[in-house]
Image (cartoon, rainbow, N blue to C red):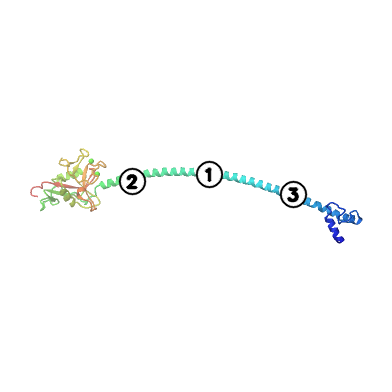
Amino acid sequence: MTAEHGTTFCEGMYSKLIDSDSPCGDLNSPDVRERHVVHVSPAKGNSRQPYKLATACLTGLCLVLLLVLVVMSSQRRSVSEVTSSLSQNSSASAQTQRQTLLVNVTNLTEQIKRLEKEKRQLEMERNALQERVKVQEATCSPALETTVPPPATPLPSSPSGCPADWLRFADSCYYISTTTLDWKSSQKFCVRRGGHLAIIHTAEEQTFIWNKLVRGHWNAYWFGITDEKLEGTWHWVDGTELVDNFWEEGEPNNHIDEDCGYIVKTQVRSRVPTKSWYDAPCEMPCLFVCEMEKPPAGA
Ligand SMILES: [Ca+2]
Ligand SMILES: [Ca+2]
């Protein structure tokens, strides 16, 4: 072993027990002491360095742990604050939504009330319009002619044996007006002409008269029936009580205090003569049908 090698080896072994048998030789020898004096001091500094390093590491670790703890605590506080904030926000949001819903419910309730009021008003208007329609339907059509009513005296007879402007059926003559009068005036007109408002006992007679009527939107013709004396009990103008009848479905209904009967003829081809009677207020001006059972002698 060379001296240099031995020195390096001894330096590495300084921390070990000093052994006289050590290959390092006699440590008390001047050469060795010198070498150790020269090399021992740095060896002592190196032996403390790991402790310093460990201390530094531990200190660093502690600092890191402290930092971690600080960060975690901060984060935990932040999370708690965020959670609390979210909870508060959620509660506030729910409260806001509840208030909004309450406002919406209130508005909808008011809207429903308003719509119900409008509905009631519209229903009233509808009912009023329906009444007007019924009255309009019950109102006789305008006169087919604007001329004054024909004279009350019979005109010269026709080949039919009836006055010239009358129609013959069986043993009677019929006059179909072209002007309008109320029911009582119509009856008076017929009486002045030697007859009365038509008294209809059979479907054949009803059909004959109905076929002679002029079609129109709602052409209504008074005939000789009324329940003016006793509501619901209908009598002919000769005082006899009604037996067979040709009322329309739902008639007579006395809808607006209707005590006189009329026959209607419309443009609707499906209508039939045996369901053409209606009741209406006697004051309405209508066309009318007169009947004369016994034509004047010589007619
Ligand atoms: Ca009546
Ligand atoms: Ca009626």
Q: Is residue 105 visible?
A: yes
Sequence-first tag of 1 and 2: 1
Sequence-first tag of 3 and 2: 3
Residue marked by disc 1? 94
Disc 2 secondary structure class: helix
**117 or 14: nearer the viewer:** 14
Disc 3 secondary structure class: helix
Residue shown at 70%/48% (left/top)? Answer: 65
Q: State whether label 2 is within 8 Å of ligand 2.
A: no
Residue marked by disc 2? 126
Specify the amino acid type for callout 2: Arg
Residue marked by disc 3? 58
Residue shown at 55%/45% (left/top)? Answer: 90
**12 or 228: nearer the viewer:** 12
Measured Cα–Cα span from mark 3 to mark 1: 52 Å
Measured Cα–Cα span from mark 1 to mark 2: 46 Å
- What number is the disc on residue 160? none
Measured Cα–Cα span from mark 3 to mark 2: 97 Å
